[in-house]
Amino acid sequence: MLVDFHTHSTASDGALSPGDLLARARAAGLGMLAITDHDTVAGHLDAAGELSGCNGNPQLIPGVEYSCRWSGITIHVVGLGMDCHHTAMQEALGVLDIARRERGATIARRLEALGYPGALEGAQAEAGESQLGRPHFSAWLVAQGHVRDHNEAFDKYLGQGKRGDVKAFWPELHQVVRWITAAGGVAVLAHPLKYRCTRMKLRRLAVAFRESGGLALEIISGRQTPDQTAALQRLARELGLEVSIGSDFHRDGPYSPQLGVELPRLEGLRGVWERWQAPSNLY
Ligand code: AMP
Ligand code: FE
Ligand code: FE
Ligand code: ZN
């Protein structure tokens, strides 16, 4: 079965509207889908509204991808299966919405200091109704002709460790895990190989995540090698974590992963999805 527990819509920095993402998932034959936009559940709620007339195909699992801080780096935690209207979710979404706005203003000030005035208005215009993020600053830099493409924008100004990589506003890892858990959800450590950590540091991160109440490791994120998947499976097994999988789909592109991931053979590991599968599917 194809499933996907990590995807983005226009509610954050994805290219497809929630409805189009849902239609794409249905056409591709996905059994389960979570729309996990950056720091908003607007995408999920939109799709859930559309899905109510379609026999629940695919099965839509509430989702979000929270930004947070741990040991000086930005970490992403995917929340799955929460009650989106729970007070803990309201609190989290409120805090992160303000954090994103203040961070956006700071990124803009830094870009202005680098000689690019008008960044905030420009990025906000790129974002429209979407949750403002670095990709919108990147799109503006490209549109202004300040850089050739997104890669150059991230390499020079927005990527990890660059001037526009502003982390100070994010809540701590343990806080976002607590919000997800309090709202009845499962906290998943997203794309563990994207933080450019050493193996030792990644292990420390996974331990800290588990000690905060985190439940699962994302062992497949988009395109990766079988060796990478095997290493993440070993880490999950060693730490007693469940596993999740997703494409982290944002848009179509020659190097971008497509929607949908084949359920892997788990050999002793537990998939987060097992708790949402209908009992008849379990046997
Ligand atoms: P933000 O949530 O504002 O921190 O932006 C993070 C998003 O920026 C990620 O989810 C990606 O969609 C995008 N992103 C991060 N790094 C890069 C990169 N090096 N090149 C292109 N897009 C990136
Ligand atoms: Fe993104
Ligand atoms: Fe992410
Ligand atoms: Zn993502």
Image (tube, rainbow, N blue to C red):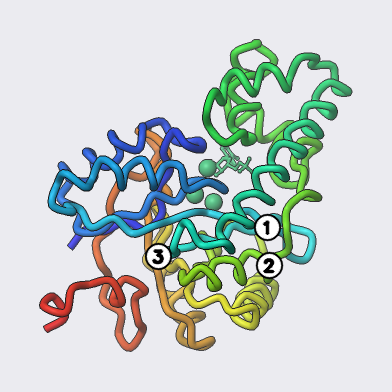
> Which quadrant of the figure has residue 33?
bottom left
- Determine which of the numbered discs, if any, sits on residue 175 in the image: 2
**Tag 1 secondary structure:** strand
In whole angstroms, how far apart are the C-alphas of marks 1 and 2? 8 Å
In whole angstroms, how far apart are the C-alphas of marks 1 and 3? 19 Å
User: Which residue in the rendered view is the most extreme toward the right?
Assistant: 113
Q: Quadrant of the N terminus?
A: bottom left
Mark 1 closeness class: few <14, some 14–19, many ≥20 residues within 10 Å: many
In whole angstroms, how far apart are the C-alphas of marks 2 and 3? 18 Å
- Which x, y percent locates residue 226? 37, 66
Disc 2 residue type? Gln
- Which x, y percent locates residue 20? 28, 34
Proximity of marks 1 and 2: CB atoms separated by less than 8 Å: yes
**Is the CB of mark 1 within 8 Å of ligand 1?**
no
Going from the N terminus, do you reach mark 2 or mark 3 first? 3
In terms of depth relative to the viewer, which is nearer, 27 or 121? Answer: 121
Left or right of 154, for residue 268: left
Q: Which residue is mark 1?
A: 68
In terms of depth relative to the viewer, which is nearer, 113 or 283? Answer: 283
Going from the N terminus, do you reach mark 1 or mark 3 first? 1
Who's the residue at 62% across and 36% down the image? 133
Nearest-to-viewer mark from 1 and 3 = 3
Who's the residue at 42% across and 42% down the image? 43
In terms of depth relative to the viewer, which is nearer, 132 or 254? Answer: 132
Disc 3 residue type? Gly
